[in-house]
Image: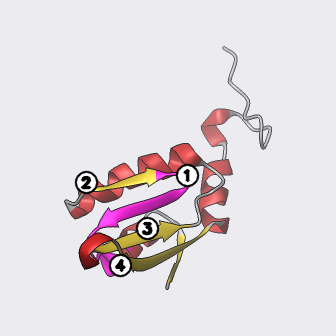
Amino acid sequence: MSAEICSTCGLPKEICVCEDLGRETTVLTVGMDTRRYGKAVTVVRGLEANVDEAEKLARDLKKALATGGSGKAGVIVLQGDHRKEAARILADKGYRVQTA
C-alpha cells in the first residue's frame, strides 16, 4: 500500500495541508464595478496563483448566489451586487476577505 506524496509539502496526500495554508494566506478583494448600461457586477480578485481554483470557486459562488458570472484569469465576476454575500461565503470557505 503506497501513499501518494504531495510535491509541495512532502507529506502523504491524506494529511496534506497545502490547500488549507493557501486559503489562509490568500487575501481576496471583493468589490463592485459597473459594466455596459450601468449594470452592477461583483468582482473578486486575488486568485491569480491558481486559475483552476478561481473557476471552481466561481462555480460555487454562482450556485450559492443564484446568479450568472465567470471565473477567468484568477478574477471572478458575478452579475449583480453581491458583495456582502460573496464575502460571507468566501470567509466561510476559509479565505481572508477584504471589501473594497
- Residue type, numbered disc 1: Ala
Residue 31: percent from left, percent from top = 44, 79
Q: Earlier in the sequence, mark 4 or mark 2?
A: 2
Label 4: which secondary element? helix
Label 2: which secondary element? helix
Q: Nearer the viewer, mark 4 or mark 1?
A: 1
Residue closer to the observer: 38 or 8? 38
- Residue type, numbered disc 2: Lys
Residue 48: percent from left, percent from top = 62, 57
- Residue type, numbered disc 3: Leu
Dot label at residue 83: 4
Tell me which segment is drawn in magenta. 72-86
Residue closer to the observer: 87 or 17? 87
Dot label at residue 73: 1
Label 3: which secondary element? helix
Q: Earlier in the sequence, mark 1 or mark 2?
A: 2
